[in-house]
Amino acid sequence: MMDNRKNSDGPKPGGYNLSDKPVRHKMTMSERAKQFAPFSALIGLEAAIAAKEAEHSREEKPELSEDVLNDLNQRISNLYVKDYVKVTYFSAGKYLTVCGEVENLDSHRRALVVAGREIHFKDICKLS
């Protein structure tokens, strides 16, 4: 009886010849880089967490005193287009501050436009 392992022409242990192995081609650098690219198993998780945090960090709109409201009304009535202002206002549950020239004053809509943002008079907390 002949041992197959010693016969170089016959099948190798495992039942295949070494010549039957597929030839692997060298990978390009971009193909290799794909193997090590960052992977996020939970797509959208970061955005969902940020939305939840923003929801929890909302503040209540403040009630301004009569004196503060009168001061704001006086300052708004003295505004002109092209005046440079710093406006702190309340929007979407948080305080925002914008600086720039007054682009438009609309007494009918009771709003002013600064740096491309329309700000309603009722949302203004501070004006300088």
Image: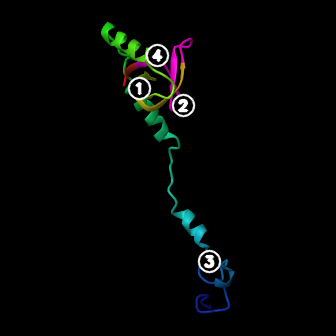
Which is in the foreground here, disc 1 or disc 3? Answer: 1
Q: What is the C-alpha distance between the residues marked 4 and 2? A: 15 Å
- Quadrant in which the N terminus appears: bottom right
Residue 17 falls in image quadrant: bottom right
Q: Is residue 21 above or below residue 81?
A: below
Q: What is the C-alpha distance between the residues marked 4 and 3? A: 67 Å
Secondary structure of the residue carrying tag 3 is loop
Q: Which percent across, then down, holds residue 113?
A: 52, 25
Q: Nearer the viewer, residue 125 or 62?
A: 125
Q: Which percent across, then down, holds residue 99?
A: 43, 32
Tell me the residue that label 4 is attached to: 121
Secondary structure of the residue carrying tag 2 is loop
| N-terminal label among 4 and 1 | 1
Q: What is the C-alpha distance between the residues marked 1 and 2? A: 13 Å
| N-terminal label among 4 and 2 | 2
Task: Give the residues in magenta.
Answer: 106-124
How dense is the environment of label 1, judged by Cα within 10 Å: few (below 14), some, or many (20 and up)?
Answer: some
Q: Nearer the viewer, residue 122 or 24?
A: 122
Badge 2 amino acid: Gly
Which is in the foreground here, disc 3 or disc 2? Answer: 2
In this image, 126 relative to 83: left or right? left
Tell me the residue that label 1 is attached to: 87
| N-terminal label among 1 and 2 | 1
Q: Is residue 111 above or below residue 54?
A: above
Tell me the residue that label 2 is attached to: 116
